[in-house]
Image (tube, rainbow, N blue to C red):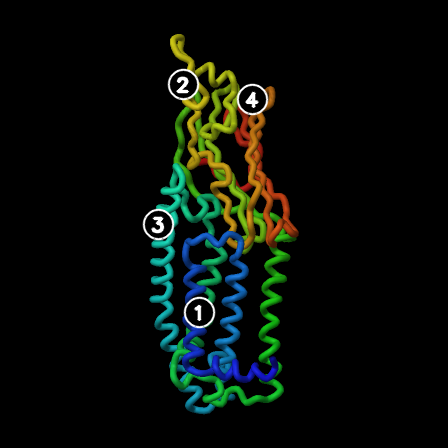
Amino acid sequence: MSGSTPIIRARLAGRPGRRSLVVAAWTLIALLASALPLHGFGILVVMALAGLDILLLQATGWLAFRRGSRLDERQRRLRDFAYRRGFRWIGLAIVLLYVLWLASDIAVTVISATTSQFSIPAFSAVNTGTPGRIVIALAEVLLMLPTCVIAWREDGGGDTDGVADGTERDRRRTWVAWLVLPGIAAAWFAAVVWLPLQSAPHGSFSSSGGGPSGTTCQTYAGGVMAGAEFGASVGLRANVCWDGSVAYVSGNPSLPLPASVIRDYGVPEFTPSASEINPAQPMLSGCGLDNLSDFAAVGQTTCTERIDASGTMYYTVSARVSPLPFGIASREVSVALVVTRTGKVLEGQGFEES
């Protein structure tokens, strides 16, 4: 195995090998910048991208990050060219990644509309901050474009440029660089499992109607993040109605309406059924609709409602966030919303009233 290592390194240092690494790296960047769901496997994409970065850096002799005093005139000229060309392409790369995200977002939304009754956006309407996957894709563009330019050129190999001199220092740099991978995995795991929960940035929602005469309805949205933007989000979206005597969630048939509300909908000749007065409205009261699971899996989502004797509504969304398969090291995450019969919010983390 050790005898094959120099052969593998020599192939990667060649122009076809370096170009293959560049194409593979940009394929993963495009995946991160798209709206395609990662279903909890985002950390594997990030680690694979980090591994490709290390191979690219070693194949180019780390030329893009070498100090000028250690380079000859030809190497310095190649490095300066790579920075000029790379930073010239940054703007174009960001525009192309945005177009990719927009196109994939539309595609995912259209596909979800054909498989369910309602169109579900690719990104949560609750966690509207910059996703961690986008942060990583942009950082990759900014840091690795010069190295990609060097790797793509005929004279971009580290060995041909004399940058990798085979000294003990270079050999030590070769294996020390790979320690980045377990470091990334450990930092991500610790963030998802032990980092305190944070309020998820929320989007804005228009006021909603519904309910019998004298009833006010409002959509509330909020949520929490485990592991910040590099973990998972558990979101809550509920269309809450109140009439001065009771508050309740409307638009989720699995949560029965109070008996007094059903009576208010009735007329002497006709008493509507619960499904007729409380049709499903997932875009207003979707259970699990706003969960995000790019870097950790979110499962076992439950939405419960309790109304006490005073008419105050207690609405809770609970889910299990698992960074590893089979629920290993998972944590229970809950989001609660408490609204009085007069519409006053008593409890809610990261909520916005639309």
Q: Secondary structure at mark 3?
A: helix
Is the Cβ of the residue at disc 3 closer than 8 Å to that at disc 2? no
Q: Which mark is residue 213?
A: 2
Q: Nearer the viewer, mark 1 or mark 2?
A: 1
Question: Are the residues flagged by discs 3 and 1 in contact, CB closer than 8 Å?
Answer: no
Marks 1 and 4: CB-CB under 8 Å?
A: no
Q: Nearer the viewer, mark 4 or mark 3?
A: 3
Q: Residue furthest top?
A: 268
Residue 114: image tag: none
Residue located at (38% from left, 56% from top)? 101
- Could you tell me the amino acid type at mark 1? Ala
**Position of residue 229 measured from the top left corner of the image (x, y, whole percent):** 52, 54
Q: Say which label, 3 or 2, has the lower sequence index.
A: 3
Q: Which mark is residue 24?
A: 1
In three-dimensional space, the C-alpha distance between marks 3 and 2, rounded to whole angstroms, equals 38 Å
Q: Residues within 10 Å of mark 3 (few under 14, many from 20)?
A: some
Check the image and report above or below for 187 versus 12: above
Of 263 and 269, nearer the camera is 269
For badge 4, the amino acid type reads Gly
State how far apart marks 1 and 4 are (Cα).
58 Å
Mark number for residue 106?
A: 3
Front residue of this view, candidates 330 and 134: 330
Residue 133 left/right relative to 193: left
- 273 or 249, which lies in front? 273
Please name the amino acid that badge 2 sits on: Ser
Crowding at mark 1 (Cα within 10 Å: few <14, some 14-19, many 20+): some
Point out the image quarter for the N terminus: bottom right
